Image (spheres, rainbow, N blue to C red):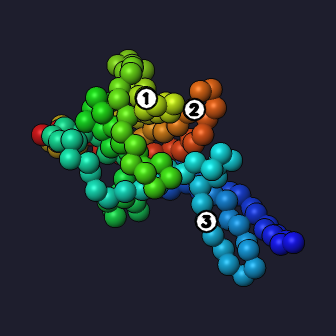
């Protein structure tokens, strides 16, 4: 019989833009491993390759400023017609279902999954083709929230 013992602690870390993430630090022996908290075994992983059908004007979201600097996306869309996330190492394409222009949210579906992007804050520089944004990404299956995380991003217009 195999005995597995892990001690965990959780904390909320915030970056300089106030974007928070819940981190679980699991100590197994002398080894520490960090992962985003999720009791459903669903992990949204970052990716660096933008799918080919995302062209022109697009929204790019990241988990942190460091990820943004490194080009590690958590979500990308072509203004919410189609979007992509990496769920458990598999790129998943979502199709827009609903867009709340006044509420700044996007709701998309892919099979049993529902993906919601809520834009909480945006700042536009008139001299740039970029709009900086802060928000939240939520992945649901039926009525269960599988993943929820604060995000930062940019809207790039050509």
Front residue of 42 and 8: 42
Left or right for 7, reference 18: right
Asked if disc 3 and disc 1 are in contact, CB closer than 8 Å, the reply is: no
Q: Which residue is mark 3?
A: 34
54 relative to 43, above or below? above
The mark total stands at 3
Label 2 sits on a secondary structure element that is strand
Q: Position of residue 118 (x, y in %)?
A: 45, 31
Front-lying residue, 7 or 43: 43
Q: Is residue 121 above or below residue 25?
A: above
Q: Element at badge 1?
A: strand
Q: Which mark is residue 109?
A: 1
Within-10-Å neighbours for mark 3: few <14, some 14–19, many 20+: few
Split into 4 quadrants, where in the image is the C terminus? Answer: top left
Q: Residue at x 63, y 57 (%)?
A: 23
Residue 2 point in image, percent of width and height: 83, 72
According to the image, label 2 marks what residue?
A: 141
Neighbor class of circle 1 (other Cα within 10 Å; few <14, some 14-19, many 20+) is: many
Q: Residue at x 40, y 43 (%)?
A: 92
Label 3 – label 1 distance at C-alpha: 29 Å
Q: Earlier in the sequence, mark 3 or mark 1?
A: 3
Quadrant location of the N terminus in the rendered image: bottom right
Q: What distance separates the C-alpha of mark 2 from that of mark 1?
A: 10 Å
């Amino acid at each position: 019989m195999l005995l597995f013992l892990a001690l965990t602690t959780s904390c909320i870390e915030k970056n300089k833009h106030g974007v928070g993430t819940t981190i679980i630090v699991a100590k197994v022996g002398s080894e520490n491993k960090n992962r985003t908290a999720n009791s459903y075994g669903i992990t949204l992983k970052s990716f660096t390759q933008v799918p080919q059908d995302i062209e022109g004007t697009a929204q790019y979201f990241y988990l942190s400023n460091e990820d943004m600097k490194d080009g590690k996306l958590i979500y990308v869309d072509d203004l919410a017609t189609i979007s992509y996330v990496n769920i458990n190492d598999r790129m998943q394409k979502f199709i827009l279902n609903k867009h709340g222009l006044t509420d700044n949210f996007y709701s998309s579906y892919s099979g049993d999954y529902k993906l919601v992007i809520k834009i909480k804050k945006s700042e536009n520089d008139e001299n740039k083709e970029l709009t900086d944004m802060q928000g939240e990404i939520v992945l649901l299956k039926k009525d269960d929230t599988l993943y929820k995380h604060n995000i930062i991003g940019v809207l790039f217009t050509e």
